[in-house]
Image: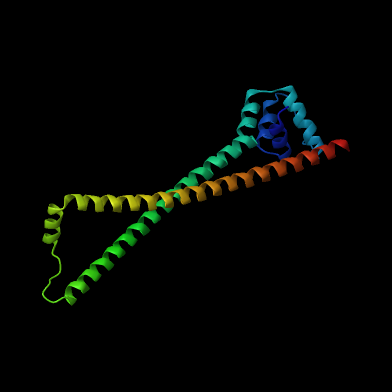
Amino acid sequence: MKLSSVLASIKGTETEKIASVADSGKTAAAPSTTGEKLKQALKEAAASGTPSVEKNAAAGSPVNDLMKTASQIVGAEHEALVKEAQLYGCAVADGFLTRIAQHTDAVEKIASAQPGKTAAAPESFEKFASDNPELVKEAAELGYTSTLGQMEKLAEVAYTKGYNGAVETIYKLAHASFVQGFENAAQLITELRK
């Protein structure tokens, strides 16, 4: 009938305590074996069916527990993905700054090696940019497109890794719950046959 309430009462959880309090006037000695506990739980579930027992049984059901665990895992995965994306963003930005510094050093070396020519001043870039706005715009778009492509690849890898990790964790939890439930059911059947 209500497998979760039966299993919960066998384990001696709060459902059993509430169910025994909900039975008005029925005071029975605590069952000592699992078979007796099962029989007592089945009697209580079949006899009363009070809302408080059903509410507590539904609240402690394996499906709700699994859904709660899955939502916690997904939330943690999301936080991990955000942190990983931030780290990737920092790494890409550091790479750009390092590359710019290398180019600046190379330009300074070339400018200092050539006699009669001085290093380009910021004003000369502004003059170049005002003289060639299309070329500067094209360079900016190329840099933006390249960076966006790299960030999309990194985000896709991070998403796939996080999704696969979440699915694997959920599968492991579901498998463990199924195996435990199967073992409990087998043990109950064995004890009932005695």
Quarter occupied by residue 181: top right
Location of the C terminus by quadrant is top right
Instruction: Measuring from the top left, give residue 75's x and y in whole percent.
Output: 48, 43
Q: Nearer the viewer, residue 159 or 48?
A: 159
Q: Along the line of sight, which residue is nearer the eye, 167 or 80? A: 167
| Percent of width and height locating residue 173 | 63, 45
Percent position (x, y) of residue 113?
18, 77
The spot of residue 96 in percent (x, y) is: 31, 60
Q: Residue at x 34, y 61 (%)?
A: 95
Residue 32 in view in this figure: no
Location of the N terminus by quadrant is top right
Relative to residue 72, is residue 39 depicted above or below? above
Please indicate whether residue 78 sits to the left or right of residue 8 in the image. left
Q: Left or right: 1 with respect to 162?
A: right
Identify which residue, 143 or 44, lies in the foreground.
Answer: 143
- Horizontally, is 136 left or right of 60 in the view? left
Q: Is 96 in front, or is 17? A: 96
Q: Residue furthest right?
A: 194
